[in-house]
Amino acid sequence: MKLINPDAPDEYKYETDYRNIPREYLNPRIPQGRGMVKWQAFKTLPEQYERLEQYIQDQNKIDKPILSDDQLSELNDTLVFKMFHDPVITVNYYEDGYIKNIEGYIRKVDDYEQMLYLDVGTGLSRISLMDIVEIK
């Protein structure tokens, strides 16, 4: 068997993996290396990182939920009840692959444009009636 580390103690003389040898028994004259400089060339394309980040975000997106006629009827009944009895409403709606929620006062329901107008703390918000998933 070939002697790898002649100056090391007996248990480390034949060890080929330097990670298993304590630092004090290693040769201090071995050059450090380039470190992270070797990865600098890959960082020249910022568009690549933006695209990868977009791919990661797209993995969390979901398809738009399809509601049955019974669910749509229940949403309609809840909306009519909230309009006349309790104008504070919390709406869960679908937007760009995510289910979002918003809370506010019902300002207007436009049947022609199929839009719900809510008065939230920051101003007026428009939500399509076709995107509403749940009303609380």
Image (tube, grey):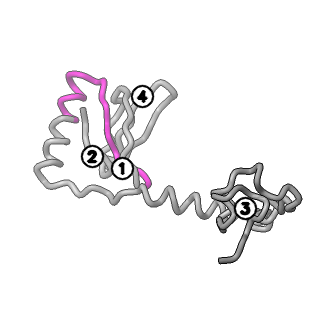
Q: Could you tell me if the residues under marks 4 and 1 are in contact, i.e. CB atoms within 8 Å? A: no
Q: Are marks 2 and 1 in contact (CB under 8 Å)?
A: yes
Label for residue 94? 1
Q: Nearer the viewer, mark 4 or mark 1?
A: 1
Observer-nearest of 42 and 47? 42
- Name the quadrant containing residue 62: bottom left
Q: Nearer the viewer, residue 13 or 24?
A: 13
Range of residues picked out in magenta: 79-96
Does the magenta segment cover residue 81? yes
| Residue located at (24% from left, 32% from top) | 136
> In front of the other: label 3 or label 2?
3
Q: Are there few (<14), some (14-19), or many (20+) residues within 10 Å of tag 2? A: many
What residue lies at 58% left-to-right and 58% top-to-bottom? 53
Is 11 in front, or is 29? 11
Residues at circles 4 and 2 in contact by the CB criterion of under 8 Å = no
Q: Quadrant of residue 90?
A: top left
Name the residue furthest left: 70
The image position of residue 19, as x and y in percent, is: 66, 58
Report which residue position mark 4 lands on. 119
